[in-house]
Image (spheres, rainbow, N blue to C red):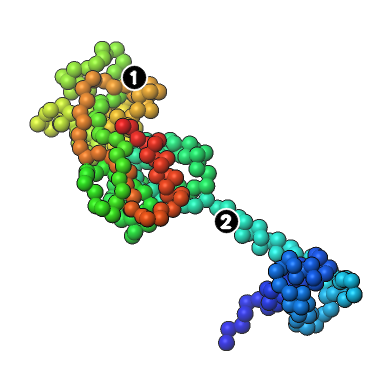
């Protein structure tokens, strides 16, 4: 038989003792605990019997702690205070919401706004999973996803359009310094082109031939190269809006191309969604949308 790790008196007996020690009256202790005076007296007597010590001196009008009882009360009170503080910290912890996004959405839209989200929803702890893989809401324990996809959606899913893919060609102002803007398609072809895994340059330039240039497996890497002055990148306007506004990138041609699929906010339908998930859903719909 496995022995208990700790030898502790029953919790109810300790509670009866702690309240009685504070109130120095079984009747007052019984009122605080919501039980009968006899039940409190019985619990305290059982505790004294188990310990083999007198914790109180009984008088007609109340109680007095014995020296052993006073010392024990200080320790028991400290233990109950520790439990109360631990419980308070547990209940005050933010509720976790998991969102699955593509690496580009994470780097260009979500991460720059995390401080804003924390200020707006301090009761929520956002867990971000950046992946190109399509998440399974149940298997991957994902609450919300941002995905490049098409309608229609299964009846089990709720979706909200965030933005369409309007492709724009961007470069560092240092790269195109001295060149008159906007550039023509021929001028653009003469500059180093930066390709990502989506490879939209042939569509953008209406070319059937292979276009030279550095190739990256993520749009964020191509944009980092553009910011470093290494060439011209092609990206969805939503991903470069902040860099264009700040002047870190410039749109080098007036030409744009809108392609499918679109970026949607997606979650499972639920008759009783968690409040924290609802809050993040509403925030993302408002702050990540470019419609």
* Residues at circles 2 and 1 in contact by the CB criterion of under 8 Å: no
Residue 64 in the figure: left or right of residue 38 = right
Q: Residue furthest left?
A: 208
Work out whether residue 166 or residue 151 is closer to the camera in this orientation and state it: 151
Q: Looking at the picture, tell me which residue is in the foreground, 58 or 125.
A: 58
Q: Quadrant of residue 232?
A: top left
Q: The N terminus is located in which quarter?
A: bottom right
Q: Residue at x 26, y 34 (%)?
A: 164
Figure quadrant of residue 185: top left
Disc number at residue 65? none
Q: What x and y, as percent, mark residue 142?
A: 37, 53
Q: Residue at 35% of width from left, 24% of height from top?
A: 244
Label 2 belongs to which residue? 91
Per the image, label 1 sits on a secondary structure element best described as: loop
Which residue sits furthest bottom?
A: 1
Relative to 36, residue 23 above or below: above
Number of numbered discs overlaid on the protein picture: 2
> Would residue 76 be found to the left or right of residue 238 on screen?
right
Q: Residue at x 33, y 29 (%)?
A: 240
207 in relation to 219, above or below: above
- In the displayed structure image, the side of residue 213 where residue 250 appears, left or right: right
Q: Kindly identify which residue carries mark 1.
A: 174
């Amino acid at each position: 038989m496995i022995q208990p790790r700790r030898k502790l008196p029953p919790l109810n007996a300790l509670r009866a003792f702690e309240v009685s020690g504070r109130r120095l009256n079984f009747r007052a202790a019984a009122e605080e605990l919501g039980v009968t005076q006899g039940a409190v007296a019985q619990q305290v007597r059982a505790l004294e019997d188990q310990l083999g010590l007198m914790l109180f001196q009984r008088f007609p009008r109340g109680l007095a702690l014995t020296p052993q009882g006073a010392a024990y009360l200080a320790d028991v009170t400290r233990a109950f205070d520790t439990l109360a503080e631990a419980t308070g910290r547990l209940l005050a912890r933010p509720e976790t919401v998991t969102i699955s996004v593509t690496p580009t959405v994470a780097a260009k839209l979500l991460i720059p706004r995390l401080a804003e989200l924390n200020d707006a929803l301090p009761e929520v702890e956002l867990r971000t999973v950046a992946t190109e893989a399509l998440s399974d809401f149940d298997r991957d324990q994902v609450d919300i996803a941002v995905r490049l996809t098409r309608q229609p959606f299964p009846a089990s899913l709720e979706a909200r359009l965030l933005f369409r893919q309007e492709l724009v060609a961007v470069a560092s102002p240092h790269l195109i310094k001295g060149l008159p803007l906007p550039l023509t398609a021929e001028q653009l072809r003469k500059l180093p082109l930066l390709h990502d895994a989506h490879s939209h340059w042939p569509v953008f330039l209406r070319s059937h031939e292979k276009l030279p240039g550095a190739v990256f497996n993520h749009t964020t890497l191509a944009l980092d190269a553009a910011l470093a002055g290494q060439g011209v990148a092609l990206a969805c306007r939503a991903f470069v809006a902040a860099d264009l506004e700040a002047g870190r990138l410039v749109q080098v041609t007036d030409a744009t191309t809108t392609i499918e699929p679109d970026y949607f906010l997606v979650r499972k339908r639920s008759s009783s969604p968690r409040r924290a998930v609802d809050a993040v859903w509403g925030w993302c719909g408002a702050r990540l949308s470019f419609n």
